[in-house]
């Protein structure tokens, strides 16, 4: 059992509070991703779980044990660092063996474990090389291998793919997911890339400025974002936001147009300032659609198309359409949100108006 | 999602273009090298360099001169491509072999084959530098092979000379040889048996019983280059050289080892641990650099005496164990070791002690090597402190022994010079073998 539980965990550097009381519960075997813009405290939170960074308040529970006072080495965790942090003066084999040597594992067993893990990660032909002779992807594998050989209770990944090029990143993403399936271990993964979060996670924790904005399964976050920040952060391209006011159970946008709203599902009080959120792929070109869009650029990818434009008041809007479209730059299109696929947020608090 | 879509074709085309551009210069190069090697076909090279080459081929006469110019041209593209696959330009590399190497390096010029004025200036400057640096050392080594008479001679001569001698029947010692310059024996080599008040008594090899009297201006000494190796042998026979050598070696090795250990630990703490007062500690350590040794000499002497280390080699070793310079040098290097590596080791269950030995020390090896060289030189050449602490002859270091050759009234120059050379040798060889670490150490403190 390697559950990770955070109870009102706080962290301050001097007077600056960087983690403002986070509650989180990662179940055994879950792949949990911490995501957020840079500076949101996600790496600090991970280092606090690892024990490398002391906490200022609250409790961290791993398994069934409060580990606040247990040093990093004895928490039974393994971490993969952003810079890989391989020991540059050791060969790959020595890098992999180092952790096991420190636990007084017999030599033969170390050898066997290292060989097995190296085969699994396809680095067995690199065992006698030094890190400087490896490519970025190979270093990444070694860093992961170093974590795997230790057979930790929980894996911690600190932005492990951010130094790789785009193509390799996609491959490694799949491999880490496969590794998780194979090891069935609890993993906590930090990234600023919401695509990584969406594709890999069982659960995503969205962080902003040291606070947990939402914690849940990826599609829940996508379909039912709890506030404006999560709505804007999850999903690519970004969700479109249009501000307006509720009038006669309909939405009157600042640009002057009126949109009818579904009767149920939202808390619609008259006169409230709201923000409408529509994902680019939930907008359609429709004859007589309520929103006139002046096209500023079109990207045709063959199988799908992106249309960028602005409403009459200058609000930018993005459309993501499947197939190919005949829109021209400068043309005015009439568009409409598709069915019920809209989100409404209170403009003042940013919270979703969805009734659950 | 978009990223995944773009990822594949992007990467693919990137790879393809890479191989294409990779191939092009190779093609070019083989052309250029081929043209250069044949020498006659200078016009074949394409691109911008072709223009230069054409103007060259006008000034340079064809034939043998053209052939000498060719390897030089072949060298340029070779250097640019770091001489990757060498097999390709086999004839060219055979031609360049004569130019590269030490000779090629020593005769390198700025202009192509011709001496530019900057070449003259730099060669003159460098020659002057060599003379300035090596002159005294060469002078010392040659003088150490001169006997007392030759050392006293004025004006001095560069090479060690000694008068030749011959064994003549009836005389126990070999006689110094002279050549007679005037009189009936002119041109003959004679052995001098006695000399007094402008008169010399000589004998010839053939007729040892016939003592001939000549004036001293009728004969000139016959001299040849002779190395007085007895300067060296008597160091071992008359003086306890090996004892001095052992003392110096022991002090140098022990104090270097202790110093490296103490300094690297201090540097580790000061560079990688956050603790209250860290900056103050560092400032105090560096601040001691400003206190001259002479100021602390007396207090230090009292401490050493109180601790019973007077006239003991440890009295020299211990006070020099921690040096602010060493702490600072190592700290600056250790700061560049990424913290993430230490964090990784901590996650790998390594104790702080183990992190120090297995991570910090191997990674700081270049800086430690630099400090080791410095420490060895400091301790080996140290004079003032050993002079104060060590008073008994059996504890003398080489430097103190050298000093003892220099008396108030008389100085034993042959022994002094010979021992100076022997004292220089170890330090020079340490420097020769370890100097590449100095270069790499300095280089790697800069980058990465």
Image (cartoon, coloured by chain):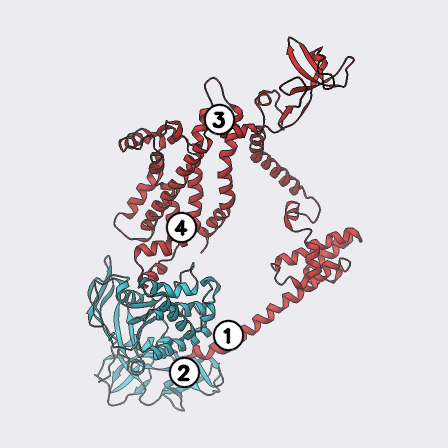
Dot 4, how many residues are within 10 Å of its Cα: few (below 14), some (14-19), or many (20+)? many
Q: Earlier in the sequence, mark 1 or mark 3?
A: 1
Q: What chain is tagged by disc 3?
A: B
Rendered image quadrant of residue B240 = top left
Give the vertical position of A141 relative to B176 (above or below): below
- Residue A238 seen anywhere in this rendered image of the structure: no
Identity of the residue furthest to the top in this view: B197
Task: Please name the residue that numbered disc 4 is placed on.
Answer: B333
Rendered image quadrant of residue A354 = bottom left
Residue B238 numbered mark, or none: 3
Residue A294 numbered mark, or none: none
Q: What chain is tagged by disc 1?
A: B
Front tag of 3 and 2: 3
Give the chain letter for cyan. Answer: A
Front residue of A204/A214: it is A204
Residue A319 numbered mark, or none: 2
- The span from disc 2 to disc 4 (Cα, nearest Å) is 54 Å
- The span from disc 3 to disc 4 (Cα, nearest Å) is 48 Å
Task: Please name the residue that numbered disc 1 is placed on.
Answer: B11
Callout 3: helix, strand or loop? helix
- Residue B371 seen anywhere in this rendered image of the structure: yes
Callout 4: helix, strand or loop? helix
Residue under disc 3 on the same chain as residue under disc 4: yes
Q: What chain is tagged by disc 4?
A: B
Front residue of B294/B409: it is B409
Identity of the residue furthest to the bottom in this view: A287
Give the vertical position of A13 relative to A158 (above or below): above
Identity of the residue furthest to the front in this view: B170
Rendered image quadrant of residue A231 = bottom left
Image position of B441 (left or right of B385): right
């Amino acid at each position: 059992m390697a559950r990770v539980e955070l109870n009102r965990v706080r962290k301050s550097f001097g007077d600056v509070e960087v983690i403002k009381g986070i509650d989180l519960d990662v179940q055994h075997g879950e792949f949990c991703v911490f995501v957020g813009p840079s500076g949101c405290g996600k790496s600090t939170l991970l280092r606090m779980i690892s024990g490398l960074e002391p906490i200022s308040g609250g409790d961290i529970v791993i398994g069934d044990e409060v580990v606040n006072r247990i040093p990093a080495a004895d928490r039974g965790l393994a971490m993969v660092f952003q810079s890989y942090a391989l020991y540059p003066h050791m060969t790959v084999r020595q890098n992999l063996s180092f952790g096991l040597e420190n636990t007084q594992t017999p030599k033969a067993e170390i050898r066997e474990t290292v060989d097995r893990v190296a085969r699994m990660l396809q680095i067995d032909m690199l065992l006698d090389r030094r890190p400087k002779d490896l490519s970025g992807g190979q270093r990444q594998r070694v860093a992961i291998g170093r974590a795997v050989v230790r057979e930790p209770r929980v894996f911690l990944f600190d932005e492990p793919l951010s130094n790789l090029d785009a193509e390799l990143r996609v491959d490694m993403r799949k491999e880490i997911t496969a590794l998780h399936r194979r090891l069935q271990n609890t993993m906590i993964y930090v990234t600023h890339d919401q695509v990584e979060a969406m594709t890999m996670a069982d659960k995503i924790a969205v962080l902003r400025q040291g606070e947990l904005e939402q914690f849940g399964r990826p599609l829940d976050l996508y379909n039912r974002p709890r506030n404006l920040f999560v709505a804007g952060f999850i999903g690519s391209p970004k969700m479109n936001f249009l501000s307006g006011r509720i009038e006669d159970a309909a939405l009157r946008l600042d640009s002057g147009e009126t949109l009818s709203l579904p009767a149920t599902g939202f808390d619609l009080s008259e006169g409230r300032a709201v923000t409408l959120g529509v994902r680019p792929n939930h907008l359609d070109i429709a004859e007589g659609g309520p929103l006139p869009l002046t096209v500023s650029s079109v990207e045709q990818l063959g199988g799908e198309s992106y249309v960028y434009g602005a409403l009459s008041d200058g609000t930018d809007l993005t459309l993501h359409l499947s197939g190919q479209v005949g829109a021209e730059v400068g043309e005015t299109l009439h568009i409409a949100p598709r069915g019920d696929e809209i989100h409404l947020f209170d403009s003042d608090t940013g919270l979703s108006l969805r009734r659950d | 999602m978009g990223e995944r879509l773009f990822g594949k074709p992007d990467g693919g085309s990137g790879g393809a273009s890479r191989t294409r551009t990779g191939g092009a210069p190779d093609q070019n190069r083989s052309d250029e090298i081929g043209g250069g090697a044949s020498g006659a076909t200078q016009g074949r090279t394409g691109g911008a360099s072709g223009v230069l080459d054409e103007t060259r081929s006008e000034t340079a006469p064809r034939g043998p001169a053209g052939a000498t110019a060719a390897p030089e041209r072949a060298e340029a593209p070779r250097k640019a491509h770091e001489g990757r696959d060498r097999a390709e330009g086999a004839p060219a590399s055979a031609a360049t072999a004569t130019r590269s190497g030490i000779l090629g390096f020593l005769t390198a010029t700025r202009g192509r084959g011709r001496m530019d004025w900057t070449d003259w200036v730099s060669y003159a400057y460098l020659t002057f530098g060599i003379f300035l640096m090596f002159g005294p050392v060469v002078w010392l080594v040659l003088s150490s092979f001169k006997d007392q008479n030759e050392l006293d001679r004025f004006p001095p001569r560069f090479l060690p000379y000694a008068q030749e001698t011959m064994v003549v029947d009836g005389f126990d010692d070999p006689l110094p040889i002279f050549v007679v310059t005037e009189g009936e024996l002119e041109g003959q080599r004679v052995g001098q048996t006695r000399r007094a008040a402008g008169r010399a008594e000589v004998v010839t090899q053939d007729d040892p019983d016939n003592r001939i009297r000549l004036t001293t201006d009728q004969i000139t000494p016959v001299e040849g280059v002779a190395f007085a190796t007895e300067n060296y042998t008597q160091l071992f026979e008359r003086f306890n050289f090996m004892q001095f050598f052992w003392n110096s070696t022991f002090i140098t090795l022990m104090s270097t080892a202790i110093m490296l250990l103490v300094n690297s630990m201090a540097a580790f703490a000061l560079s990688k641990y956050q603790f209250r007062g860290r900056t103050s500690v560092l400032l105090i350590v560096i601040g001691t650099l400003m206190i001259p040794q002479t100021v602390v000499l007396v207090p230090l002497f009292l401490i050493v005496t109180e601790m019973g280390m007077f006239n003991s080699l440890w009295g020299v070793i211990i006070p020099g164990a921690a040096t602010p310079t060493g702490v600072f040098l190592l700290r600056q290097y250790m700061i560049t070791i990424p913290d993430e590596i230490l964090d990784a080791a901590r996650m790998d269950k390594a104790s702080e002690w183990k992190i120090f030995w297995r991570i910090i020390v191997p990674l700081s090896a270049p800086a430690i090597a630099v400090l080791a060289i410095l420490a060895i030189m400091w301790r080996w050449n140290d004079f003032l402190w050993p002079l104060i602490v060590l008073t008994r002859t059996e504890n003398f270091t080489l430097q103190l022994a050298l000093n003892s050759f220099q008396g108030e009234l008389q100085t034993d120059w042959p022994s002094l010079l010979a021992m100076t050379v022997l004292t220089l040798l170890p330090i020079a060889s340490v420097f020769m073998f370890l100097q590449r670490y100095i270069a790499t150490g300095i280089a790697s403190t800069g980058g990465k």
